[in-house]
Image (tube, rainbow, N blue to C red):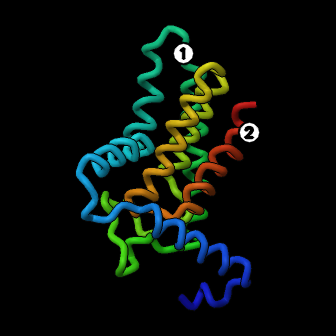
């Protein structure tokens, strides 16, 4: 909390808004099992197994070449590296460290900002959307849902998700141009 007090007032206001939005959106432990199951399935699409696995699995489609998969994996790796550097530099604790919130899925580490799952889902979506523009909207919608799931399940604040997705977009520019 002492770090927060040293922050400029505009960052304190942004943090307060982020926490308020989170409190309105996250599911409670007593939420219906169907909602928890749905959002848990969606959230795993941003995990390492799914993001790497789906990128490699895409090679089964004749329109997908090895170069596209390598570029997407490179984007995934670079964006993840940026996320990890920022996470350890900022050190924002996850919402589940507050006594009033419980994460509804296992958290990969103790840092919240930025969201690695959101970044990974967006990186894969952007990687394939640039090669297949007709698929861009569905891919970006799924990436958006992965980010939203992280908030719904009490793992990240909304700002963590947005910054994770922005990191993927910024990392994509030099790799995919």
Task: Name the side, left or right, on which 30 lies relative to 171.
Answer: left
Precedes in sequence: disc 2 or disc 1:
1
Q: Residue at label 1?
A: 64
Quadrant location of the C terminus in the rendered image: top right
Crowd class of label 2 (few under 14; some 14 to 19; many from 20; radius 10 Å): few
> Depth check: 97 or 91 in front?
97
Position of 5 relative to 20 (above/below): below
Name the residue: 42% across, 69% down: 110
Picture quadrant of residue 101:
bottom left
Please, which residue is most extreme toward the top here?
Answer: 62
Q: Which residue is mark 2?
A: 173
Instruction: Decide: few, some or many residues near mark 1? Use Cα within 10 Å; few <14, some 14-19, many ≥20.
Output: some
Q: Is residue 65 above or below residue 70?
A: above
Coordinates of residue 12 in the picture (x, y in percent):
65, 81
| Numbered badge on residue 47 | none
Give the image location of residue 106, x and y in percent: 31, 59
Between 106 and 38, the one lying in front of the other is 38
State the separation of the CA atoms marked 2 and 1.
Answer: 20 Å
Residue 59 at x, y = what percent?
A: 47, 18
């Amino acid at each position: 909390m002492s770090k927060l007090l040293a922050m400029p007032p505009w960052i304190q206001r942004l943090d307060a808004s982020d926490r308020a939005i989170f409190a309105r959106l996250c599911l409670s432990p007593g939420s219906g099992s169907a909602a928890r199951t749905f959002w848990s399935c969606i959230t795993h699409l941003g995990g390492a197994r799914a993001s790497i696995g789906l990128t490699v699995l895409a090679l089964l489609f004749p329109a997908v070449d090895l170069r596209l998969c390598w570029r997407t994996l490179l984007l995934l790796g670079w964006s993840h590296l940026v996320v990890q550097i920022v996470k350890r530099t900022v050190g924002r604790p996850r919402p589940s460290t507050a006594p009033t919130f419980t994460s509804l899925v296992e958290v990969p580490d103790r840092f919240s900002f930025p969201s690695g799952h959101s970044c990974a889902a967006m990186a894969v979506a952007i990687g394939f959307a640039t090669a297949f523009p007709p698929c861009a909207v569905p891919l970006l919608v799924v990436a958006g849902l992965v980010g939203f799931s992280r908030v719904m399940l009490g793992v990240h604040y909304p700002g963590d998700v947005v910054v994770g997705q922005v990191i993927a977009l910024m990392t994509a520019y030099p790799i995919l141009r």
